[in-house]
Image (cartoon, grey):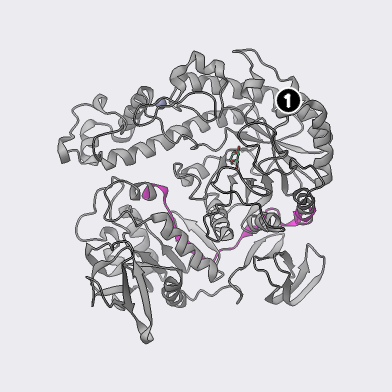
Amino acid sequence: MPDSTPRGLTRLAFGGDYNPEQWPEDVWHEDVRLMREAGVTMVSVGIFSWALLEPAPGVYDFGWLDRVLGLLHENGIRVDLGTPTVVPPVWFYRAHPEALPVTADGTRYEFGSRGAICHSNPGYRAAAADITTRLAERYADHPALAMWHVHNEYGLPVSACYCDTCAGHFRDWLRTTYGTVEAVNEAWGTAFWGQRYGDLDEINPPRTTPTVGNPAQALDYRRFADATVRENFRAERDVLHRLSPGVPVTTNFMTALSQCDSMDYWAWGREVDIVTNDHYLITDGRRTHVNLAMAADLTRSVAGGAPWLLLEHSTSGVNWQQRNPAKAPGQMARNSLAHVARGSEGAMFFQWRQSRRGAEKFHSAMVPHGGTDTRVWREVVELGAALDVLAPIRGTRTVADVAVLWDWHSWWAQGLDWRPSEDHDARERADTFYETLYDRHLTVDFAHPEADLSAYPLVVVPALYLMTKTAGDNLRSYVEQGGTLVVSYFSGIVDEHDAVHEGAYPGVLRDVLGLTVEEFSPLLPGERVRLNGPDGSELNGDVWTEFVVPRGAETVWTYADGLTAGRPAVTRHALGRGTAWYVSTRLDGEALDAVLGRAAADAGVAPLVELPRDVEVVRRAGEQGSYLFAVNHTAGEAKVPLDATGTELLTGEPVEGRLTVPAGAVRVVRLDG
Ligand code: GLA
Ligand code: ZN
C-alpha cells in the first residue's frame, strides 16, 4: 500500500512550485538559502520540464535535475517530483501532429502553450509512459523524494478533444458501457429527431451541429472525456507504484467549482494516494474567503474526510483574471490557515520565485521580483514560522456539522442546452446555500447523492437536476430514519441519461418531499415574487417559480403574487422520523437563512459558537487532540466564546472562557482534555 503522507515529511508542507530551469545555477544556491530562511519543507519540481529532460527523442539529460534534487536534499527540503507530461516537447508534436487536440468545430490547436493534449492519442500515451518510467527508475530511491506529482491540473485548459482518434475511443467506451447500439439508441432517446444509429461505428463525438445536438450524447461525452483523462493518470500512477513502491502519488485537483468543471472529483478522489488541490481567489466581488472555505471543504470531502494538501495558491495577485488585485496584509496567512483548518496538511504556492519571462511573469510568488526586502517575503517568512508551530495538528480531521449534496454529472447535465431558464445555475445555488451555512458558522461536508448520509443531522440539496433512483431512495431512507433534508427547485428531474423520470416532477423526490410539481414557471430578468410565511414573514424569490401541489407536505411559505400566487412556495413534509423541506423558487442568502433556520431547528443543529459573520471557527480533531481554528476576516478584534480551556499555539498563551482574535488574524487553540 502506498503511503498517504509525503515520505519523510515531519512538518506541515510549506513551499511551492520550484522551477529552477528558468534560472542560472548560481540562483539555485540563493534559492535553497532563502528556502531555509523561510522554513520551506517541500517543493514541487519538474512539472513542466519534459523538453529539458528529453531534449531530443530518446536523448535524456537528468544532470540538472540530479543537481537540483541533491541541493534540496542537502538542505533538508523534501521534493514533490512532477512527471512532466502536461507539456510534451515540440519534437514530439512534429512527429505526432495528431496528438494536438481538436475542438468541437474542428480547429486543431498548435504547440506553444501548455496542456495541448489529445488524451486518446496512442503516441502521447506511449511517450508519457516512457518519460514517467525513466524518471521513476532514476529517482525512486532518491532520498529527497516525498511524493510524485503526476501531470498538472488534468482537465485544463482542454477538457475534451473531438478528433478522429477520440471518436474511435468514444465508440470503444460506448461498447464497454452499453454493449450494443440498441442500448445506446435507447439511452440517448434517438427516436427523437430521427437520430437513430444502425451501428456503433456511425457514432461521432458531439461535434458542432446546426442546432442543439442530442443532450444524452453530450452528457456521455463529458463522462467519456473525464474517464479518458483518468485512464492516463492511472497509467502513470501504476508505473510509479511499480517502480517507486510506497511513495504516494497525487495529481493536483481544482475543486473550486469556478476553476474546473470537467473532472468528476468523486471518481478522482479514489485514484490518488493523497488528494491535493490548487486554489486561487476569484475576484468577482463576492467574499473570496467563503469561496475558499467551500473549495477546501469540497476537497476534504473528495478525500473522504482524510487530510489533504493545498498544493498551490498565491502569495498575492494572480495574472489571469481581468483585474488581479494584490492580497491585503495578512490575507495570505489567513487564506493558508483557513485551508489548514479545513483539513490541509500545509500550504504550498505557485510559485517559489517569480518568473522574469513567459506568460506568468506578473503572477505573484514567494520570492517576488522585488526580492526579500518586500512585504510578501516578510509575510512568507512569518507564515513558515506559523506552520512550523502547527505541526502537531498533522493527521487530525476537520469536524463537520451538515452535508451538502454535490455531483459533477448532475452539474454537467444541468448545463446542457434548452433548459427552462438559462438564469438557473446549479453552481450559483450551491454557492448560495454554502454561504448561508457558512454564515451560520456550520462546517460543511460535501457528499455524493448516493453516499451514506446517516452521520449528518441536516442534508442540503442545492440543485441536483440529475438524480438516479438509487439517490432518490437514499434520501428517502435518510429522512425516514430521522434526517432533516432541504431540497431546492429543479432537483430529481432526470435520470443518468438525462431522461425525465416517469410520472410527475420531481420524479425520484416526490415521495420524500410529499408533493408534485405540475409546471415550472421561470421568471424574466428583474422579475420577483413575494412569499408570505409564518409569523407574517415575507420573502422574495426570483429566477424560478413552480406550480407545486402538496401531497402530504404542509405549506410553510405561499406565493403572494405572480402566476403561482396562492400556491405553496416552501413546504415541509414529516416522513417517518424525519422531515423534508422543499424550496420552489430562488431565494437569496438572507431569505434562505429563514428557511434553513427552521430546518436547522428541526435537525437540532446549532453552530459551534455565536459569532460575527466573518469570523470563521472550525475544529480539527484526532487521537493527537482537538484543535480549534478561529480565522478573523473582519477589521475588528473578535471574541470567540469557549467553554473549554486550552493553549493558543501561535502565541503560546493559555486560553480560558474566551479567545481574543485580533483583526485579520488567526488563532489555533489546542483544547485541553
Ligand atoms: C495553475 C497551474 C500553475 C500556474 C497557476 C497560476 O494552478 O497549475 O502552473 O499556472 O495556475 O495561477
Ligand atoms: Zn482526440
Residue 71 showing in the rendered view: yes
Camera-side residue: 53 or 375? 375
Say above or below: 567 vs 69.
below
The spot of residue 98 in percent (x, y) is: 43, 19
Q: Is mark 1 within 8 Å of ligand 1?
A: no
Give the magenta part as a residue range.
Answer: 385-410
Residue 65 placement, left or right of 220: right
Classify the position of the C terminus by image quarter: bottom right
Residue 499 placement, left or right of 670: left
Q: Quadrant of residue 341?
A: bottom right
Residue drawn at the location 69% of the way across and 72% of the way down: 636
Camera-side residue: 27 or 345? 27
Q: Secondary structure at mark 1?
A: helix
Q: Does 398 appear in magenta? A: yes
Type of amino acid under label 1: Leu
The spot of residue 135 in percent (x, y) is: 65, 24
The spot of residue 618 in percent (x, y) is: 62, 65
Residue drawn at the location 81% of the way across and 44% of the way down: 372
Residue at the bottom extreme of this rendering: 535
Camera-side residue: 207 or 232? 207
Q: Quadrant of residue 391?
A: bottom right
Q: In which quadrant of this rendering is ligand 2 seen?
A: top left
Residue at the front extreme of this rendering: 323
Neighbour tally class for label 1: few under 14, some 14-19, many 20 plus, Cα within 10 Å = some
Residue where numbered disc 1 is placed: 65
The spot of residue 247 in percent (x, y) is: 66, 35
Q: Quadrant of residue 137?
A: top right
Q: Does 381 appear in magenta? A: no
Say above or below: 347 vs 400.
above
Residue 454 showing in the rendered view: no
